[in-house]
Each structure stands twice: as structure tokens, then as C-alpha cells.
Amino acid sequence: MTTEEIKEKSIKYRIKILACIKQANAGHTGGSLSCIDILNVLYNRILDVTPENFDSRNRNHYIQSKGHSVEALYVVLADKGFFPESDLNTYCRHGSHYVGHPTRQVKGIEHNTGALGHGLSFCTGLALGGKMDGRNDKVYTLLGDGELAEGSNWEALLSAAHYKLDNLIAIIDYNKLQITGWTKDVCATDPLEEKFSAFGCSVQHVDGHDVEALTKVLQRVPFAREQPSVIIAHTIKGKGVSFMENNHAWHHHVPTDAEYAVAMQELNQALIEVRRC
Amino acid sequence: MKQKVTSIMNQLELGKANLTVFADTLIDLAKTDKNIVVVTSDSRGSGKLTSFAEQFPDQMVDVGIAEQNLVGVAAGLAAAGKKVFAVSPACFLTARAFEQIKNDVCYSNHPVKLIGISAGVSYGALGSTHHSLHDFAALRALNNMSIIAPADNFETRASIICAAAMKTPVYIRLGKRAIEHVHETDAVFEIGKAITICDGGDVAFIATGETVVQALLAAQLLGRQGVSCRVVSMHTIKPLDIEALVHAARECKAIMTVEEHLVHGGLGEACAAHLLQAGIALPCKIVGIRDEYTFTGTQLDIFKNYGMTAAGLADAAVRLVKQE
Ligand SMILES: [Mg+2]
């Protein structure tokens, strides 16, 4: 897939995320817009996880530890053909499997998340199991920077480093915000690179909205033999809609009709521009 | 859950610690199954797993003193196709890692076998930090979870063999001291099927785990006084064998439940709830640890203090039948 096609997908995904949240009148808007470029590159260029190979163990794995950004995941999974896009019209509705955090009831999802600080331990076990059986698959997980306050993450890193899991890749959606405000004001999780390095991981930074840079860094893992890789993806919460960017109020705010109209206008304009390039 | 294992023990002879039998059984299973994996939290010594670790170093994972990570890693290994036994003291495993058990194991339905070692008041005078008197109550509240408290060496070996084949989560809690055999040589074990050890019509003891031997001894004391007792080993707390419970309630004059657990939320309340919903009313007593600052001593000292040894159970049974 060309870079232009990937860039176009990012904007289309954003449009679908907002449509999904708007029709459900629920969702985690800011975080989904923050991580969607990462998911776009993972699913369209890196993972090679498809509905056809999903039931096999011999494939790569993606576990979304920051489960609340589930709209981003649903939109990408629908695009990859795991389920019909129309299923998302049931998002958060009576009796739907498409609930507000990932569950295995939805095809394409292999672990239930939503309580923070669980993904890394699970991925450590998954990566270790793959190594035990001599498989070459990689295990990717996405964490929020606010989520890093959960101590269980650091327990997981201890064992991931101890067992030399260079098939484990943790991506931090480093948007520097959480529900209350700036992470540095709530309870700082910085400095991240020093912490991950001290825990035995090899660390790279990337612009989490630059799909080419994301592709390059994800193609280079593991960064060091016998070490887990950590990618600190510098992102903007609410990215792509001017008034949602860097504003923690959009953590799980649903746009009003007027806000939705402006957001769609901005995103459609961006779509025209990316097609013009 | 249908796997059946038959006893080869002799009743009331002193056996090994259930923990030791658990570790020996795992070694037997691992000899023919490379997918058996043990995960511990610096607990291989207390879990009697040193020999397993020496024989199968590639099937042994230690996460250090980190119970939350223990359970999360175990869930990931299970998802990778391993038959995972997550082994840690019951007190820490079921409290510290409760959210991992709830979400990563039960809600996600990964078939982890959680082994709570030195459970109940096995740690005796080490105090309440080391007791697990909440684990039945806590784990009964989780969808997908099966809960087993083996009474003796036979039930322990059988439950481990059955657990290895299970495709859903299971919690097995094991005691620390050498325990008497409670079954005759022809006993058969199946998860969810209680074992009636002896039959009688006055009092039915529905007991679980290491209290079963006390109930059996109480039944023998009572037999000499002309009180006829049934003893049921309700090794599986969830799913509860309702059929065996209802039979006992219909065929006996009174029911006493016995468990090494707080009187709240465990076997006793599970039985009481089912009997009430079945419309069966009879004299009934829930025997367990009272809701208070727990008495200090060995496991048997604590049993004695709470009327959970043979003599205490026999006294309470007589009072219950006489409706005192
Ligand atoms: Mg954040």
C-alpha cells in the first residue's frame, strides 16, 4: 500500500471513528484519534493479521492494552474485513457485542482489555509461549502514557526483560494527556525513555502521526537482540480535528451536532488535500 | 470435566501433603506433555516444585514476587497454547491478582489453572495476611471459573489431572500439612460431582477441602452414639453438585456444611441458597471461620477454636438434631 493510500486511510478512519461515536452517543474520542495512525500502519503494513489467518497461532499478535480507544480498533478491523462495517452501527447498543472496550466476542480481538495495566503481562506470556515453541511471531501492544502509572506494567517489563523477549513490542501512545489533564500534572510518568531503558528495554522515539516514520521504526524491531522493544510514539490527543487536539475534555466527550459538522468539514477538507498530493 | 480418576488409597491412613501430591502429579503429566508449563512467583519451594524445575527447566517460568504479572503472563501463555499452572500462595494469588483473574483469565476465558497453595489457614500462626478465607467467596463471583478444594491426596491428584484437560479457567486450593486419606479404594473423581464417603440418615456433613477428614472423624464419633451420618466431599464448590446436595437434604434430618473459609460467601452459603430456592427447609448449620480477627495457632488449633475438628463438629451436630 502506498504512503498516499495509507495517509488517505488515516483520515477516512478518523471520519468513521467520529461517526461511530456520534451515532452511539458514547466513546473515547481523543484517544482513538491519537492512536489511529499507529493502528493504520500496524494493520496495513506490519502485522499481516487477516480474517483468514486469525485462528492460527503462527501469526503476529496485537493486543490493545489501552482498551478504551476501541473505536479506532473496530474501524480498522472492519476495514480489514473481520466483520461488516455496518456492525458498528450497533456500537454500545442494546445486546451488541461491540461494547466500549475490546472483547473476544468480536472477531479479530484476542484478549479482553479495558482495565488498564493488563496488556503487557498478557503479551509477555504470549511472547514467551511463542519463543517456547520456536515460533517467529511478534507480539505488539499499545499503551497509554497515563496507563503507565499502573504498577503491573513495570512488573511485566521485569519478566519480559528477564526472559529476553525481543519478540515483544510495546508502543506508547505518548499524547501526554489523560482524563484529568496533562499527565505531568496528574502524576508524572516521565521520563519514559530512561525508565524503559532501566527496565532492560531498547527504546526508540517516533512521530506517532507520521505514517512513513512509523513504518520505518516498526520494520526495524527488535531494536536490540534479546531485549523487548519500546516505541515512544509522540502523539496528539484528538489529532485531526482542530478543537479536539490537546484538550483532555475530549477524552470521552461526544461531539454535539454543530461540533460534529465542523469536525467532518475539517476531515473532509483534509481528505481532499491528501488526494490532491 | 468428565475425566474420571479412581482412588488407590486406604481411608484415614496419613498421606502426604496435598501440595506434594500436586507437584508429583505435575511431574507425571509433564513427562508426556511438553505443553505443561508452571508459572510461579518465587514460590517454587513452597509449592514443592523444585524437582519439577530441575527436571523440566524449559517448562518452568518464574516472574518473581509479582502476583498480578503471574496471572497476566499465565493468561498469555494459555493463549499461546500452553497448559498453564499458575502457582502461588492462595492468599496472594486470589487477592493481589484478583483483577487479573477477573479480566485476563475469566472474562477473556483463557484456560489458566490457578493453584492456590497453603490455602485456608494452612499458614496458621503467620497470621491473616497469609490466610485465604475469602477465596471461595471472591472467585464464586466470577463467570467461567470452576473452584475445587481437594480433601486428600486422591482428590488432589485427580483434580490436577482433570484440570490439565480443561478448556476453561479453574482454581484449585491446596493445604500444606500431611493429610489423611478420606476415600476408599473404589472412589471415583469427577469435577462437579460430589463424593458420598459414607451414608446415613440423621445428619449430612457437606464438607470441602481439608475439613472433610474432620467431618469423617465426627461421623465415626457420632456413629458410636447412635447418630447416623452421611459425609459428602463437596470438592467442587463451583459448579456445585446440586443433585447430591438435594439428595442429602431430602434423605437426612439436618445438614451441616464445613469449610476452611469465612462463614460468608463460601460452600455453606452456596448450599443454603440452593436449598432455599429448591423449597427445602431443614435444620442447617454453616461451620467455618467466624467473621472476626482470626484466632492464632496451627491449622488444627484454629479448627478447634472454631468448632471445626471432629469433637466440635460432633457436638454441634447433636445440638442441631435435637434442635437446641
Ligand atoms: Mg494519554
Image (tube, rainbow, N blue to C red):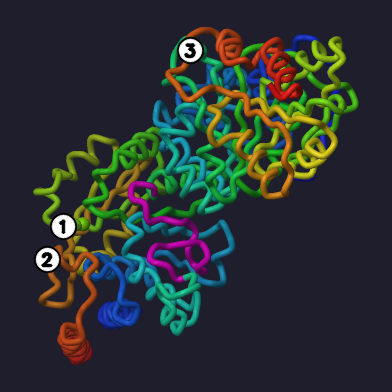
Label 3 sits on a secondary structure element that is: loop
Specify the amino acid type for callout 1: Leu
Q: Nearer the viewer, residue B230 or A1?
A: B230
Q: Position of residue B98 (x, y in %)?
A: 45, 39
Specify the amino acid type for callout 2: Asn
Q: Residues within 10 Å of mark 3 (few under 14, many from 20)?
A: some
Q: Nearer the viewer, residue B52 or B141?
A: B141
Query: Which residue of the protein is positioned furthest toward the right in this rendering?
Result: B186
Label 2, on which residue? A246
Label 3, on which residue? B295
Q: Position of residue A143 (x, y in %)?
A: 30, 54
Specify the amino acid type for callout 3: Phe
Can you tell me which quadrant of the image ligand 1 is in? bottom left
Q: Which chain is indicated by disc 1?
A: A
Residue at 46% in and 56% down: A112
Report the span colored magenta: A98-118
Residue at 46% in and 47% down: A127
Label 1, on which residue? A177
- Quarter of the image holding residue A254? bottom left
- On the picture, is B126 further left or further right than A29? right
Residue at 15% in and 44% down: A187
**Contact (CB < 8 A) between labels 2 and 1?**
yes
- Quarter of the image holding residue B57? top right
**Contact (CB < 8 A) between labels 3 and 1?**
no
Label 1 sits on a secondary structure element that is: strand
